[in-house]
Amino acid sequence: MTKRIVIGACLMALAATSMFAAKNKGGKVLNIYVWNDEFPSRFNDFYAKKNPKLLEGVKVNFIQTPNQDNAYQNKLDEALMNQATAKDDEKIDIICLEADYALKYVNSPYLLDVNKDIGLSKKDLANQYQYTKDVMTDSKGKLRGVSWQSTPGGFIYRRSYAKQVLGTDDPVKVQAMLSDWNKFDDVAAKMKAAGYFMLSGYDDAYRAFSDNIKSPWVKGNKIVVDPQIKRWIEQTKLYTEKGYNNKASLWSSESTQGMQKDGKVFGYFAVGWFIDFCMPHGDGSAEGDWAFCEGPQGFSWGGTWIAGAQGSDNVDIIKDLMLTLTCNTATLKNVCIEANDCVNSAAAMKELTAEGYKSAFLGGQNPLEIFLKNGAKISKSTMSPYDQTMNEEIMGAMKDYFEGKVDEDTAWETFYTAVIEKHPNLKR
């Protein structure tokens, strides 16, 4: 039995800082496991620079491994297996997790209890969206991690192309033209006729469908394919054949090119972190030529949660970080303003809206109103520990089908084979 399979079986208020001493009472190295630069930027910009006292004399070490093909989980799993015997300065202190595989770690012995072990109270966490707490709550009702962000989605589109093709760039009027999938298809045809792509490629609409599934991907040990997944496949095949998309894969250079000033893509299904972290900002970009609407159906996508690791000797830093970055309204408002991110506090976003918040990237629009509306609807009741594998493998397997290289039955065979190879306990 491989180590990965063994692991899989085993892992089933700036003011708030005043309550701590000037220096960290724990270790001299803070080891943080991440898969990209997003959390390091939040840590450095909204915690370390503005609240350095606890970090005096502490080396912050980000251990970064890409998420693709389970690489991040494999690296993390190996370290967790050695956590009990590792030297203090080599122990994991903070783990970043995504919703697609959070349950694997939440229901494991490796994460600290946010309330009992770290010391955050229910009052501290009162303003956070319930779904963000549900994602990190184990089978015994213990909270194992928190997030600074919430991830309600919508459709971000190019204002200039909307004016040219639809006669308006007003988000309310454009939303009326995109309020269901039939209308969305009609606009896609108009964009194609005008020389634009409705979407950049195969995976753009995936989360708008996959986040609306009614059944988890796995029931018992059986793989279940929800009708929403089949609807995504049908639409994407149609869009590919009709030239409504640019045949790009998610995260590819072709997809990113569509966002540039000279890009030909009308819009993207997006959440706050996507707008901030994935879209081009600055000179030469299309900044200011974008607007945001709800799109044909609500969804959420991803998110980053931070958890404390059992065995950490830096629990005081973990507590202070969680309080400052995920509970403090002033900090969260700054994250909204400076990073265009959607935060895990309706209270913070309501305050900003009342204060006249506008996004320069979105041409002066306030997207928080949409985030607030859609954020209140998010539920993660269909999550499973297999979601990352399912999402990656279905998008990968269907690409050849969309491109006409194989028929649909062959694509499904590729999907099932890949999933069962990674999870031999599952069956079709």
Image (spheres, rainbow, N blue to C red):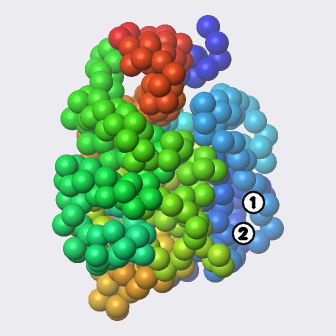
Q: Residue furthest bottom?
A: 355
- Quadrant of the drawing holding the N terminus: top right
What amino acid type should be assigned to the residue bearing mark 1? Val
Q: Residue at x 33, y 69 (%)?
A: 165
Given this view, does label 1 or label 2 mark the residue nearer the observer? 1
Label 1, label 2: how far apart the Cα atoms are: 8 Å
Q: Residue at x 35, y 76 (%)?
A: 163
Q: Residue at x 32, y 54 (%)?
A: 188
Residue 167 visible, this angle: yes
Q: Which residue is mark 1?
A: 60
Q: Which mark is residue 55?
A: 2
Q: Residues within 10 Å of mark 1 (few under 14, many from 20)?
A: some
For the residues labelled 1 and 2, say whether their Cβ atoms are less than 8 Å apart: yes
Asked if 289 appears above or below 313 in the picture, the reply is below
What amino acid type should be assigned to the residue bearing mark 2? Leu
Q: Secondary structure at mark 1?
A: strand
Query: Would you identify the image quadrant in which residue 409 lies?
Result: top left
